[in-house]
Image: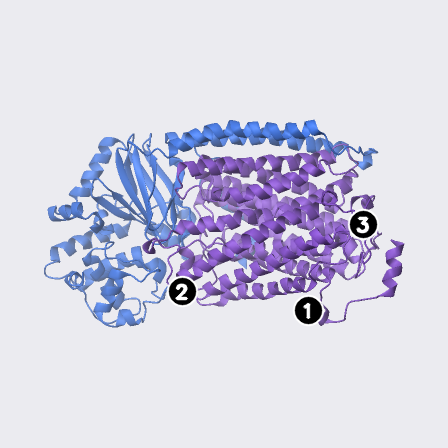
Chain colours: A purple, B blue
Amino acid sequence: MSVTAIHDDHHDHGPTKGFMRWVTTTNHKDIGTLYLVFSLAMFMVGGAMALVIRAELFEPGMQFVDPLFFNSMTTLHALIMVFGAVMPAFAGLANWMIPMMIGSPDMALPRLNNWSFWLLPFAAVMLVSTLFMDGGAAAAGWTLYPPLSLQAGASFPFTIFTIHILGISSIMAAINIIVTILNMRAPGMTLMKMPLFVWTWLITAFLLIAIMPVFAGAVTMLLTDKFFGTSFFNAAGGGDPVLYQHLFWFFGHPEVYVLILPSFGIVSQIIPTFARKPLFGYSSMVYATASIGFLSFVVWAHHQYTVGMPVEGELYFTYATMLIAVPTGVKVFNWMSTMWQGAMTFEAPMLWAIAFVVLFTMGGFTGLMMAISPADLQYHDTYFIVAHFHYVLVSGAVFAIIAAVYYWLPKWTGVMYDERLANLHFWLTTISVNVCFFPQHFLGLAGMPRRIPDYALQFAEFNAWSSVGAFVFGFSQLILCYIVVKSMRGEGEKATDEVWEGASEHGLEWQLPSPAPYHTWEHSPHIH
Amino acid sequence: MKKLSALLAVSGLMGVGEVSADYTLNLTEGVTELSRDIHDLHMSIFWICVVIGILVYGMLAYSLVNHRKSKGVIPAQFHENTKLEILWTVIPFLILIGMAIPATKVMIKVYDTSGADMTIKVTGYQWKWKYEYLDEGVSFFSTLDAKSNQARQMNSGVDPTTVENYLLEVDHPLVVPVGKKIRFLFTGGDVIHSWWVPDLGWKKDTIPGFITDAWAKVEKAGTYRGQCTELCGRDHGFMPIVVIAKPEDEYKQWLAEQKGGRTPEEAEAANQDSEALTVASEGAHDQPSDKTSKVTEESADQQFAASSAGASKDDLMSLGQTVYEGHCLSCHQASGEGIDGMFPAIKGSAVANGPVSGHINLILNGKPPLMASFRNVLKPEEIAAVITYQRNALGNSTGDIVQASDVASHQ
């Protein structure tokens, strides 16, 4: 450590001052911060849209919005949360942490890094601007199934262009992460010594490179169907609307693992630290992640059990999908075994990580139920599905991101957050997220379809509960914003370099000063 | 603001609770063999999850309570156990095989549509269903009933909780016999829809240009309700499904009424072209519970009587309004103002105020991909009526009267 500090004095490349620092920066920490701030802003925008949905669904009857606008809200809520909030948050965490965790001075491709971030705000503005176009924003769901998506108004090409930009940004970020991990590790940091967060991101990055072009291709085919007279998805011209669904879900299923694998990595960092024990089954964690990554490519049509595939297809996708439960189970058992006979403390990051394990497992159970194709003939496109994917994406991916923020925030800012406020944030969020999404299981089983703006009377109670939960959940996130802003202003108790008791045994980042200097690991650390 | 504050008030919850219908927590067992099989699968996988859940959450809870630093625990340092890891890979795998076997059996049964006693073709349209009894020459459209449709409009002033079967009632339910294996064929008229009645046990997508199939053998007479479950545009939430299962003899009687409720020529025409039947003439069989179907029935009858001489403007306007509400309103809106950028206005439009022939052409041929062709959906007299209505209402006043013969000459 002392060696690094002496050398830092010799070439002091501090950041340039003012706004241009953020526009022109090629520093992985600056870009990480940009990603994370952008993600938080989008989380609030997408969340506001969710609250429009839940306000309309609070009671039977149409009270606030036109059904078409309601459909735009469900569509944009999903697109913004997936591409604007969760993915950029992971990219931000990767930027900040991967170089620090593998002992590298920066990302391998810093200018590309800058560009892949700066595409995002423009894409986001363009996507939101479609709300003000003739015919309103895209309203066919984030899946954009034709022929319905082809009925869109002026917003259609803009929506597709947005997807292209987001895709380019993701691919560049993925390339950068792969190149960094494979080339920039400190001597002695073999692949099988890498922290789990780095491993999961490496696999995620390969998934991204494989799937984003497929999505780009599929939406481009939509574009030519609409404007250039092709008939990829139109039976009258020899095409097939279901072809789009296969292309979409070939992208879409690995995509949901893009949203969850880095979460697995985060939780695998946090639990050992607060259990004061090494991670149980490190290599089986790596293999399980790789298996999940592989299986994610061969199960896509389980989103399409009702389109009338041949029965052999239904059965194949049933078996393949059920298989995913095995490596996922291994991960959950490993986390439990890591906690077993540990000496646990329950600071905010650990609380969120434990909630992740509990609630993600809930989502895993419903996922297993849905894998059973005959049963899915009932569950498909109901609120049961909505409950399932919000358990894995909100109390899964989002909880992991929040856990990561609390875990590394002292390292980023040099100050401790307010533990009491963080506890309040945790309990409000965890209780409300369950009030919001748990009743949706019942709604789905009782027969409520998803994506409807109004419903029959027997669904009223649970929808009211769900809406109350959603509003409490939404407003609780203001606490997170407050905590983050306060830390960014440097207010709070000074953090130690190790931050968490014994953390220096759990990763290179804890051997650096807090806050982490603008340049770190200019000289490679020695890994034993 | 009042709504918003109610939203956050817990008292609001109780208010909703008092007036709503009975809710359920679990999947229905339904009334077919398939729905029971699927319910059984659902319950077995559910209980498997419950047992695993109790074990996993139990271990976790034990660990969280006992393995705390505050209890002075010295952390163990073990980090692998090959036997254990093999065990918890193999056991889940065996459980999965145990689930896959019954699931396979049920799925094969779901796909076995052979040996059906009758076939019903279901076509999904934005936003209504068309049912065709292929062997009987009977067909009709089924749309959201008038009361629900009125109550669900924004600021309708109608409290949905006062509407019976709110959003789950249609004007013309699908009637099926009990104890017969019915093969359903599905296709979409415009976009993809999905036909779901939970009591039958499955849903099936209706895909434009393709036919999918499924089957059901209803075991118990009764009324079974469902909804469209594939997002299909603005009124996706407002195209319910009602299936009434009747004993064989009552079903036969109902079928005879469908065929006998018309003039012999019409029944003949119906047999030749099942598409040519209409919502209006189907109104006769139902309990005439709502005003709309009565009006339809009468005006349709008058229409037939006067068809050679030409219908009066009043009759055309009245039938036209009914047709408008059933087929046009969901896109072009009650006011005829459409939705900016998606569905053009009829009010003051060049088509509705220009030459009659252009107007007839548009309705006969539609305007892909948004507007379907109504050539095979509506009868000439209905097309004439709705054109007359559109040209003399909704803010238009051309004074034109269009007769069925005018439409027929365009066919």
Q: Is residue A379 above or below residue B322?
A: above
- Of B218 and A113, the residue lying toward us: A113
Circle number at residue A510: 3
Residue A310 lies, in percent from the top left, at: 39, 39
For disc 2, the neighbor class at 10 Å (few under 14, some 14 to 19, many from 20) is few
Label 1: element kind: helix
Looking at the rendered structure, the kind of residue marked 3 is Trp
Residue ID at (33%, 29%): B219
Q: Quadrant of the C terminus of chain A?
A: top right
The extreme left residue here reads B308
The amino acid at mark 1 is Val
| Badge 3: residue crowd in 10 Å (few <14, some 14–19, many ≥20) | many
Can the viewer see residue A194? yes
Residue at (65% x, 61% y) in the render:
A38
Q: Earlier in the sequence, mark 1 or mark 3?
A: 1
- Mark 1 lies on residue: A23
Q: Amino acid at mark 2?
A: Phe
Number of numbered callouts drawn: 3
Residue at numbered disc 2: A227
Q: Position of residue B123 (x, y in %)?
A: 31, 48
Along the line of sight, the residue nearer the viewer: A316 or B361: A316
Task: Give the Cα separation between the discs numbered 1 and 3.
Answer: 29 Å
Q: Is residue A462 visible?
A: no
Query: Do the residues marked 3 and 2 share a common chain?
Result: yes
Which image quadrant for residue A337? Answer: top right
Q: Position of residue B172 (x, y in %)?
A: 28, 45
User: Whole-Å distance between the Cαs marked 2 and 1?
Assistant: 36 Å
- Pick whichever of labels 2 and 1 is earlier in the sequence: 1
